[in-house]
Amino acid sequence: MIINDMRKSLFPTLLAGLVLVAAACNRPSRDEQIAREAREYTMKECPRYVDKSTRMDSTTYDIATRTFAYNYTVEGELDNPALYTEQVKSAFRDKVLREIRSSIPMKSYKDEGLTIIYRYLSASTGETRLEYRFEKEEYR
């Protein structure tokens, strides 16, 4: 009698525990969520012009390297390799880093310690005009 009562009260508890474990196993990892967010942002928002010469083409996330990338194309007056002197590249890198540090929308990615890349390609040649890589030690 006592054993039957124990079985009756224990079974629902065990069943609830198994359901919770199964649900947790099916939940996507944080990395999978970030990869999905990058794909969804690209599908919904890209391509879009951020100014008359710069187009955001996509956002991507590489789970293996935990790298989130913003991919742009420059055209017109910005699609000129002579513009990209070391001084210009350094000053623009500092500007991008300041924007990352102050960005509220990027907070969850910064909290995860992701590597963040900003990549700017030439519309005319497809060559990389600028590429900046920021590690968590830089933007925190």
Image: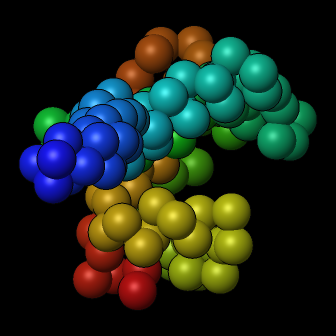
Residue 2 vs residue 111, the one in the foreground: 2
Tell me, yes or no, if residue 90 can be seen here: no
Q: Kindly give the residue lying farthest to the left in the view shown.
A: 3
Residue 17 vs residue 47, the one in the foreground: 17
The x and y percentages for residue 42 are: 64, 24
Query: Image quarter for residue 15?
Result: top left
**Side of 96 relative to 53 (left or right):** left
Residue positioned 59% across, 63% down in the render: 106
**Side of 95 relative to 22 (left or right):** right
Residue 33 vs residue 106, the one in the foreground: 33
Residue positioned 57% across, 13% down in the render: 124
Looking at the picture, the colour scheme in use is rainbow
Q: Kindly give the residue lying farthest to the front in the view shown.
A: 1
The x and y percentages for residue 111 are: 42, 73
The x and y percentages for residue 96 are: 57, 67
Q: Kindly give the residue lying farthest to the right in the view shown.
A: 52
Residue positioned 27% across, 83% down in the render: 137
Please, is residue 140 above or below residue 122 in the view? below
Disc count in the image? Answer: 0
Residue positioned 54% across, 23% down in the render: 39
Tell me, yes or no, if residue 55 can be seen here: yes
**Side of 60 relative to 96 (left or right):** left
The x and y percentages for residue 59 are: 54, 33
Image quarter in which the C terminus is found: bottom left
**Side of 122 relative to 43 (left or right):** left
Query: Image quarter for residue 100?
Result: bottom right
